[in-house]
């Protein structure tokens, strides 16, 4: 080919080498990726790519994944499972309403869950309440016992922060903490409807399960705590300063919950008595098949 094109082989090989400015650009990109990986230790290549694009880098996820792999920045995460749900009780169970909701606003659906946190010589438990539309943590509490009182403290915090209107749906598993009379009475006092997952189906509360995985991998498992006070301070910082304000969520278009609410005007509007808020609509996938003449 070189003979046909009347060029020297040395000239051809020099032409194949990337220009000096391309090498510098590659090094700057690698430096930006490494800095982002240090600042956000548990971000995968997709979130790193989204973060770089926010910094005006023109880069796709495939290139970021290749460079992270070459630099040893891709992590293999371990999986752990410990059951914290006791659904063997005689209290009332509620149907899964969340599966049929079409969300369009905050305070239409809250999701709640409990998990354990192990210290050096003690087990503590964390209860959280998330707004399913914006993925924002609106209530949380830490306690030494897995009781209804712990779940109720997280719910009370969420109610105080959000002041929801009647029509809110509260979704959880069938654990005794959420089926207890005091918890259901508190939901009914604000006009909220209880919704529960079916047994053995943790994915029906997937948004909250995902948060629990995130806080364990990115905060709890990454530190060692001296006592409960230090644990609560670090969890508060992670939730309020990192997760709600900074951490990118793929389901939100790689925005933080606070940025998502601000962009949609949700945080400023709230759900007060004069706001245009309305409960979530319900959608049944087989509606048109059952009623063929439905419009």
Image (cartoon, rainbow, N blue to C red):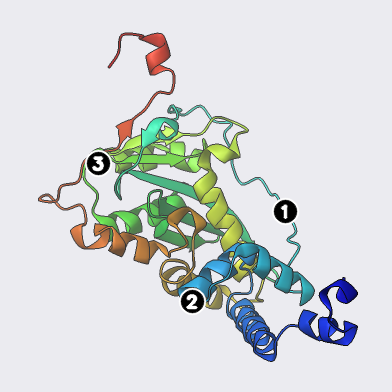
| Residue 141 locus on image (x, y percent) | 45, 61
The mark nearer the N terminus, 1 or 2, is 1
Q: Residue at left 44%, top 51%?
A: 151
Q: Which residue is mark 3?
A: 189
Q: Quadrant of the C terminus?
A: top left
Q: Residues within 10 Å of mark 2 (few under 14, many from 20)?
A: few
Q: Residues within 10 Å of mark 1 (few under 14, many from 20)?
A: few
Q: Which residue is mark 2?
A: 233
| Residue 238 locus on image (x, y percent) | 50, 72
Does the CB distance between marks 3 and 1 fall below 8 Å? no
> Could you give the CA–CA distance between mark 3 and mark 2, rounded to whole angstroms?
31 Å
Q: Which residue is mark 1?
A: 80
* Residue 71 sits above or below residue 292 on the image: below
* Residue 156 sits above or below residue 222 on the image: above
| Residue 27 locus on image (x, y percent) | 68, 86
> Could you give the CA–CA distance between mark 1 and mark 2, rounded to whole angstroms?
24 Å
Is residue 146 visible to the viewer in this orientation of the structure?
A: no
Q: Residues within 10 Å of mark 3 (few under 14, many from 20)?
A: few
Q: How many marks?
A: 3
Residue 220, quarter of the rendered image: bottom right
| Residue 44 locus on image (x, y percent) | 64, 65
Does the CB distance between marks 1 and 2 fall below 8 Å? no
């Amino acid at each position: 080919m070189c003979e046909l094109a009347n060029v020297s082989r040395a000239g051809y090989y020099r032409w194949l080498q990337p220009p000096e400015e391309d090498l510098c650009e590659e090094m700057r990109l690698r430096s930006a990726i490494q800095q982002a990986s240090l600042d956000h230790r548990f971000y995968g290549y997709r979130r790193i790519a989204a973060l770089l694009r926010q910094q005006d880098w023109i880069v796709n996820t495939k290139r970021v994944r290749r460079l992270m792999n070459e630099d040893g920045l891709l992590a293999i995460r371990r999986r752990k499972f410990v059951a914290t749900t006791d659904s063997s009780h005689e209290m009332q169970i509620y149907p899964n309403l969340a599966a049929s909701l079409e969300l369009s606003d905050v305070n239409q659906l809250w999701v709640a869950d409990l998990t354990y946190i192990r210290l050096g010589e003690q087990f503590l438990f964390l209860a959280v309440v998330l707004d399913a539309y914006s993925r924002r943590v609106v209530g949380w509490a830490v306690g030494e016992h897995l009781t209804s009182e712990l779940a109720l403290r997280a719910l009370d915090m969420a109610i105080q922060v959000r002041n929801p209107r009647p029509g809110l749906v509260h979704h959880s598993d069938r654990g005794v903490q959420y089926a207890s009379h005091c918890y259901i009475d508190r939901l009914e006092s604000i006009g909220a409807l209880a919704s529960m997952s079916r047994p053995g189906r943790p994915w029906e509360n997937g948004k909250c399960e995902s948060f629990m995985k995130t806080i364990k991998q990115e905060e709890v498992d990454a530190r060692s705590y001296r006592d409960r006070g230090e644990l609560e301070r670090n969890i508060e910082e992670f939730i309020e300063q990192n997760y709600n304000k900074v951490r990118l969520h793929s389901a939100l278009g790689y925005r933080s919950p606070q940025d998502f609410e601000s962009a949609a005007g949700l945080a400023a509007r709230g759900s007060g008595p004069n706001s245009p808020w309305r409960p979530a609509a319900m959608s049944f996938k087989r509606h048109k098949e059952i009623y063929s003449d439905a419009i």
